[in-house]
Image (tube, grey):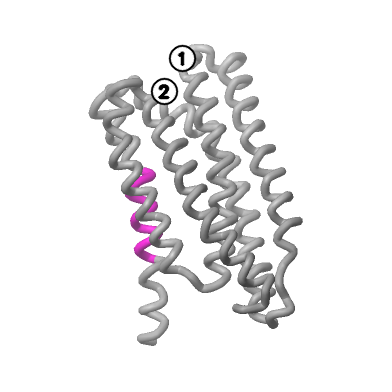
Amino acid sequence: MRSIVLECLPIASGLLIGTVYTRLDVFAVKAIAGGLALGLYSYAFRLTEPFRYMALAIESSLYSHLAGKFAISATGVPRFALISKLVFVYASAFSVAGYLVGILVTRFMYPAFITAKTTILVLSVALFFRCLNGYQSAVQNALGRYGLTAKFAVVGLVITVALIYPLTSAYGFLGAALTLLLMEFVNFLVQGYFYRNAVRVLQQGNL
């Protein structure tokens, strides 16, 4: 029981930190730009978020697949090159779909929200990196490196805290979307470094 609790702590802390920095945008937009801006930002976010949920479903399946492969033997190394290509495809598809759906819904159903179109674009691009980051986190979690994924969450929190208020002050609710995009991009670079190292070690059979 003690071992289980200790292993859960990094997971719990990562989820808690992730929850905190993904909610900061709401407080920043409301405090700096006001209720109308918050409504426009929330509208844009809600249009793209369903595609993130679809990606999460895929990442859960990937996590199970990867964990099963790693548990079997050292010879059960997944075909990372193929999986990466598939992830890139669905990340691109969801990003484009999020933007097209958002623009079409806004133009034909909710034209009063047309000022949110640039924010929809930025959030759609951010969605691309969120999908890639989700896959890279799934690889680390499948390897049992929960502490490392918790550190990725800390990176996200630091970047968000550093950027959210200056960018929101400068660009309004668009600044909150830009913060998310920059945070996910930097996280992508950081996670990518550890992902490539993990794949290299696995393929060399040293893990």
> Along the line of sight, which residue is nearer the eye, 140 or 1?
140
Please give the name of the residue rendered at 52% of the width and 56% of the height, measured from the top-left corner: 193
> Along the line of sight, which residue is nearer the eye, 60 or 180?
180
Please give the name of the residue rendered at 35% of the width and 57% of the height, measured from the top-left corner: 16
- Residue 115: mark in rendering: 1
Q: Measuring from the top left, give residue 161's x and y in whole percent.
A: 29, 42
Say what amino acid the circle numbered 1 marks. Thr
Q: Measuring from the top left, give residue 78's x and y in whole percent.
A: 72, 67
- Residue 81: mark in rendering: none
Query: Horizontally, is 42 left or right of 198 in the view?
Result: left
Q: Is residue 53 magenta?
A: no
Say what amino acid the circle numbered 2 marks. Leu
Asked whether the residues under the numbered discs 1 and 2 touch, taking CB atoms below 8 Å apart as contact, a structural biologist would say: yes
What's the magenta bit mostly, secondary-structure-wise?
A: helix
Please give the name of the residue rendered at 73% of the width and 79% of the height, measured from the top-left corner: 75
Q: Which residues are magenta?
A: 12-22
Please give the name of the residue rendered at 54% of the width and 65% of the height, measured from the top-left corner: 140
- Give neighbour class at mark 2: few <14, some 14-19, many 20+ (Cα, 10 Å): many
Distance between mark 1 and mark 2 Cα atoms: 8 Å
